[in-house]
Every structure is written in structure tokens, then in C-alpha cells.
Image (spheres, coloured by chain):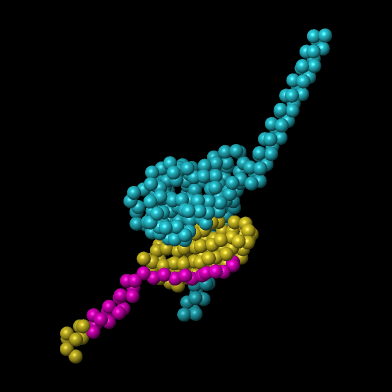
Chain colours: A yellow, B cyan
Amino acid sequence: MSRLKLSFVAVCAAAVVVVPGAYAWSQTYEQNVVWGPGSSKISYTNSITYNYVSFSHPFGGLPQMGTTLCNTSGSCYDWRWSNTGLITDERGISYGYAACKSNLGNHYQVYVNYCATGNG
Amino acid sequence: MSAVRLTRNRKLLLAAAFVVAAASTAAGVVAAVRSNAHPPPGVSAGVSSLERLPAVSTLPPRVAHFVDVAAQARGMDPTRAKTQVRKLRSDLGKTHADLYAFRSDTGAACFVLVGQVGVCPASASDGSPGLQWTIGGGYLDVPGSLVGIASDDVKKVDLAIDGTDVRTSLQNNVVFAEYPRAGKVARITIERRDGSQSSVDVQLEPSASFADLRLLHSKAQAKR
């Protein structure tokens, strides 16, 4: 194979590897579930620029939900809580995972519409 | 004879005064009980800054992105929502963040503290009476914070972290406070102009309790 052909193949191979990373990534990592106090879920690992937590309280009270981001060594930002959603976590993390959680102090169950994260 | 008439008049006056005083006291008690028992839910008493302040003509990209997401989540046209955004506070806290807000079609005050957090309640009556809030969110060297939209009938909002009072500010319907990240329990007290108040307790779950997430993460890694 000539050098030109080899170069072409190399460029194509590099494009295949690099281009997917250029697209925005997103994941809905939890949806349509009922949570008691202390339940949580995490996303896959990636570069993260947002985490959305949407919930409602059809079972009464004002249960609280939280969002956070963690790096791969398990070091996490502090939880950001509210008793009304949608919450949008506007912090970012270069490489890690997102999480959503129902507060340990909740006296009522909470309906989680979705927890979704991504970048771009 | 005239002395008798004066006495009668005095008695009548006293009786009338007594009736008026009793009625006034009863009305006051009823009003106080009502306001304590059923304060207006969420921010349904109104958020006048969303009309009083001018709409922002050019939105920063991150604010525009928040409005896109929040408006769609609440069934509102994002283009129209973007014409209604107000900048309610500037230069807040350690990150010097600005706070932008708009009223959703359901009357909720959707707001974003740029670079930190956004909240878009389902309706004006969603959330704590008088305050749609979010708390926590410290990271790196950024402290935790309380940020929220208070309705017009709120006189002040107090915050205590682990029993220690934290200074708060209330301006243009926005409540803001910062506190050290190590806090475990927050108490938010909302005091209305009629003298009634309500409070919310929040377990902040600081970073010491992240063991569960580490466990979840290692399980997820093992599954892949």
C-alpha cells in the first residue's frame, strides 16, 4: 500500500474515532418512578455540562429532590436541593457522572419524572 | 333627670365600645389563624419584579439555554419566554453570578443563577408558601447557597445552618445567602408581612454521605 493510501486510511480511522466525541451526548438515566426517602440513581460517565431533575409530589407534602456531579474517583459536589422541580444543575464536570436523589428527610414519596444529563 | 340620662348614655357608649372591641379582636384572631393555617401557596401572592423591571434584550447563551429547557418543560413557547426574561439580581456570592427569571404560563417564577442552578416550578402555587427555593450546591471553593424567588407578601427570609444564623438578602423578590460547605441541616424561615411565618428543614447531606453514590458507581462499572 502506498504512503498516500496509508495516510488516507489513517485519516479516515482517526475521523471515526474522533468525530463521535464531537457530538453532544445525553442520557436519561431515570424516569417515571416513585421514590421513598434516600433513593438515588447515577448516570454513565462522560463530560457533563448539565443535569436535570424533574419531579412532582402527587402523594402529598413537599418532598425534596437533589442533584450533584461527581468525578470518577467519587469526589462529588455538594447536593443542590429543592422541593419544586424542574431543577437544572448548571455546574459542569470535565469527566464524571451525574446523580439525582430524594432527600433522606422526606416524609412523602416523590414521583420522579426524569433525571437527565449530558453535554453540549 | 339629666344625671340619669347621662348615665344611660355612658352605659350605651361603653356597651358599643365593648362590642366594637370584641368584634375587632375576634376578626384579628380569625385573620391571624387564617394566615398561619393557610398562607398563599408558592408565590401565588405575586412577584412584582417580573413586571416592574425591564425585559432583557440580549440573553447570555447559558441563560438562553436555560429558558429553552425550562419553557419546554412547562409547555411554553421558548421564543416567547425569552422576550419576558428579567435580570433580578447581579454579582451574587463568590462566583459573582447574575440571576435571571421569567414567568411561565402557569405563573411560576422560573429562575437561573448563572453557572450554578436553575429552578422552574410547575406553577405559581408549587413549593413552600412564599418562597420557591433551592439550597446547597457548594463545589470546589464555592460555598453552598440559598437562592429563591419570594412573593410580594414576604417580609424577610431567615436561614440557619446547624442552628447558626446566616445573613440573607432579599431584593427584587430574590433571596440569596451563602454559607460554609460543611453544614448538615438548614432551616429556612419565611416571614410574611401579616406577621405569620413558616419554615422548611432540609438535610443538606454534605460530601461525607457520598459513600452510597460511590457504591452505585462501582456497581455500574462492574455491570459494563
Whether B64 is drawn above or below B28: the answer is below
Whether B81 is drawn above or below B208: the answer is above
Position in image of residue A65 (x %, y %) = 54, 60
For the point 57% across and 41% down, which residue is it?
B192
Farthest-out residue, bottom: A1
> Which of the 4 image quadrants contains residue A94?
bottom left
Whether B24 is drawn above or below A17: the answer is above
Image quarter in which the N terminus of chain B is found: top right
**Residue B212 appears left or right of A44:** right
In the foreground, A7 or B56:
B56
**Residue A54 appears left or right of B68:** right
Position in image of residue B97 (x %, y %) = 39, 50
Q: Can residue B181 be seen? A: no
For the point 43% across and 53% down, which residue is it?
B112
Position in image of residue B186 (x %, y %) = 56, 52
For the point 77% across and 20% down, which residue is it?
B12
Q: Can residue A1 be seen? A: yes
For the point 55% across and 56% down, which residue is it?
A83
In the foreground, B4 or A74:
B4
In the foreground, B212 or A21:
A21
Position in image of residue B166 (x %, y %) = 52, 45
Q: Is A26 part of what is drawn in magenta? A: yes
Whether B222 is drawn above or below B97: the answer is below
Q: Is B105 part of what is drawn in magenta? A: no
In the foreground, A103 or B153:
B153
- Number of marks in picture: 0
* Magenta segment: A9-35
